[in-house]
Structures are given as C-alpha cells and as structure tokens.
Image: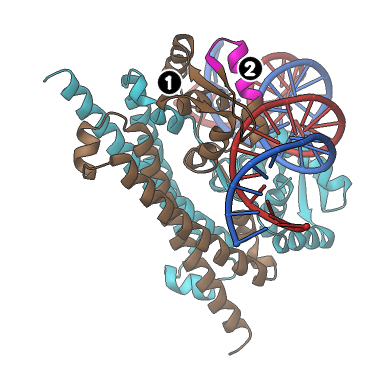
Chain colours: A cyan, B brown, C red, D blue
DNA sequence: CAGACCATGTAAAACGTTACATGATTCG
DNA sequence: CGAATCATGTAACGTTTTACATGGTCTG
C-alpha cells in the first residue's frame, strides 16, 4: 500500500502530471519503488478522490491536455502517518540472482551474457545518477548541500541508488569473469 | 512468475520440506526473492502437479509428518529455459527509502529512528552472511573455493547479499547522522 | 504454563502485470 | 513514413498479502 506514499513523496517538490510522474518513477524513484504508468494513473485517481492530492487541468494546443497534481494538507498528514509507522522490511526481486543461485546445475553461458548486460545497464545508471546528483545540489559541493540544502531527501535516496549500482556493476562484472574462468577450467583449456 | 524458479533453485542442493524452504527463503533467498510460507506451500503443490518436483512423505513420531521434495529432470529443464530467457530488470521496494525521499516535508525523528533500526538489522545480517559463507566454503579459502568449488551459485548470491547489507548499514548510519545534524542545526543549537 | 518451533494449509482481499486502446505532434 | 514523445486510461488476469486455522512437542 505504499505506492500511494511514493506518489505523494514525488509530489513534494511541486506539481506534476501523471506522465511526468511515470518519468520520475522510471528514473529516480526506481531506486526504491517500481511502478508502471497504469498503476500511477490509477493511484492518482484514488488519491484525488481521497482528497490527498488536487489536480488542475492544463489545456495545451500543440499537445494533448494534461492534469497537474499537487499534494494537499491531508496528503502531507497521510505521509507523516506513514513515516511514523514501522517500515516493512525492504525486499529485492531479481530474476538474474535466481539464475546465479542455480548456475551450478545449468549451462552458464546465458547467465554470463545476462551478467554482462546487467553490468552495462548499471554503468548507464551510474552515469545518470551522477548527473542527477550534480543537478540536485546546484552550485554547492556535496558536503555543503547535505548540511544546508533545502531538499535533501531525493539527494540521499539517489546517493543510495548510485552506491547500489556501483555494487551491482562490480558484482556482475566479477561474477561473469569468475563463471567464464570456471567454464574454461572445466573444458580443460 | 519466478517464485517457482526460486523454489526450484533452492531444491538444487537436495530435498527439502516446505518448512525448511520457508527458513531458507527467510535467510539466504531473501537476498533476491522474498516469499511467505503460504506462497511456498502453494507453489510446491503447483510444482508437484506440473511434474517439476517430486515429494515423498516422511512419517515422524515426535513431530508432525512432513513431505520432502526433490527437483525432477523436467524441473531442471524448466530452470534452464528460465535461465536462457531474458531477465526482467531487478527491483527494490523499500518503505524506508520512500520516507527518506519525503523527509524534507516531515518530522524527521521517526525516520531517523527507523534508519537506526535498519542499520542494526543490517549488522545482524552481515554477521549471519559471514558465517554462512564460511560454512559454504568449508576448509577452502574464498579464492580456492570460487575457482574449484562444486556449488558456487549460493556462495555468489550470498556475497552479493553481504555487500548489499554493508552498503545498507553504511548508508543508514550516515543518513541518520546527517538528519540528526540537520535537526540540531535547525533548532539553533 | 506461556511462548516458540514444527508443519501445512484455506480463503478473501489487495495489489501488480499485461494486453489493448486512442490520437496528435515532432524527429530523423 | 516510421518511430518516439506526449498523455491518459480500461479490462482481464495473475500474484502477493493478510487473516485465519490446527495441533503436537519442546524450552524457559
């Protein structure tokens, strides 16, 4: 039930359309909550009906019209209640790790290929997050920004995403190399 | 649809009961796939019906009877098909990160408390994983084991879990310290 | 004697994913 | 002229979570 809170959190930095939120979810929010567009649009409808957000129509001529949403006082209160309650333990779901777990009983070649691919994706995300961090902190350096910046939440979660992707890249690269070496070994090269 | 593959992967190292699998899922498998007991029992029923695993009844006198399951040839083939197919992107879901994302608009005290708690959990898991790794590699050192061990899959995923929890601990500790410092700042201490 | 551990499930409700739908504009 | 971007949904289906249920043994 925390998709709604992820949406509310994303609306803290001002008004956004559903479409913008899908972009935000694809990039930064994906560090801690994954959601597809249909989920977001459905949640926005529910949130508005519950009075936790307010939408206003924006008429556009060159593009389809859109609705921009803002968090309400009730929405803020809901977020606070959520923050006060105990957190559920986090969880990861990762197909690729299931494959690595099982790799001893299988042909390792496809797993190695997927590890390489995942490492490449991680590199992409590292670059992306590095750029986002620079943008978020503006003219300040990191220490300054973290000490005195106005909105550090997204910066902190992005930092975590960055470190996670570093870990991801290194682990995937190392694991792929190891499985390659073992394949050569067992083929008697 | 990969809960079934996580279960199959867990059965690669021999027969297990549903109850044992719930324990295994709580500990090591939780690094990449979370599942509650009801899910596991339901999946075992489906897997057996599909001929991917086989169960045998074990009568016990001091305890309730149990069923031990083994993976079949068909199950192995299914795992291979799964490994060959493209992986879905991994995702994390974490309430606590949603709270940190939103922390600028909220009372940070409960978030800080939860970060401390999470850091403590991470420390517990680091110890646990360190012990599991020692047990898995037996008399060999890590390099030896990874080069020539028989079953490295669970070792590799556990290594990743260990690093993830290190990251987790450090990030939670650092973030809690930072939010504390900012709280003092804004109160004019 | 209360609580944890062993052992396995059913049922309903909530949530998430996939497929499909629409339609205009801009970019290569 | 095909693909991507903007913009928002509905409907069907599958998966996960939550609540409930049972009952013996073993531990403090």
Q: Is residue B87 left or right of residue A79?
A: left
Q: Is residue A180 left or right of residue B91?
A: left
Looking at the image, is mark 2 or mark 1 earlier in the sequence? 2
Q: Which residues are magenta?
A: B42-55
**Mark 1 surroundings: few (<14), some (14-19) or many (≥20) residues within 10 A:** many
Q: CA distance from mark 2 to mark 1?
A: 20 Å
The reply to whether dot 2 and dot 1 touch (C-beta < 8 Å) is: no
Q: Is residue A152 visible?
A: no
Disc 2: host chain: B
Which residue appears at 45% of the width and 70% of the height? A140
Q: Position of residue B64 (x, y in %)?
A: 65, 32
The residue positioned farthest toward the bottom in the image shown: B189
Quarter of the picture holding the N terminus of chain B: top right
Which residue appears at 53% of the width and 21% of the height? B69
Q: Which residue is mark 1?
A: B83
Q: Position of residue A104 (x, y in %)?
A: 33, 25
Which quadrant of the structure image shows residue B76? top left
Residue A169 or residue C12, whichever sits in front: C12
The answer to whether dots 2 and 1 both sit on one chain is yes
Which residue appears at 27% of the width and 28% of the height? B150
Q: Position of residue B146 (x, y in %)?
A: 24, 36
Quarter of the picture holding the C terminus of chain B: bottom right
Secondary structure category for the residue under label 1: helix
Q: Which residue is mark 2?
A: B46
């Amino acid at each position: 039930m925390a998709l709604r809170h992820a949406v509310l959190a994303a609306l803290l930095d001002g008004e956004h359309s559903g479409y913008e939120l899908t972009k935000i979810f694809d990039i930064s929010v994906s560090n801690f909550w994954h959601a597809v567009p249909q989920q977001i649009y459905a949640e926005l409808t529910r949130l508005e009906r519950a009075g936790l957000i307010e939408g206003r129509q924006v008429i556009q001529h060159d593009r389809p019209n859109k609705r921009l949403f803002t968090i309400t006082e009730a929405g803020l209160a809901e977020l606070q209640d959520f923050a006060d309650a105990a957190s559920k333990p986090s969880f990861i779901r990762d197909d690729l790790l299931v494959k690595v777990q099982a790799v001893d009983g299988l042909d390792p070649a496809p797993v190695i290929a997927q590890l390489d691919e995942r490492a490449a994706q991680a590199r992409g995300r590292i670059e992306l997050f590095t750029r986002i961090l620079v943008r978020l902190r503006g003219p300040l350096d990191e220490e300054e920004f973290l000490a005195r910046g106005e909105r550090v939440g997204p910066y902190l979660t992005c930092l975590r995403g960055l470190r996670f992707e570093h870990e991801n890249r290194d682990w995937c690269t190392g694991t792929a190399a190891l499985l390659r070496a073992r394949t050569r070994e067992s083929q008697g090269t």
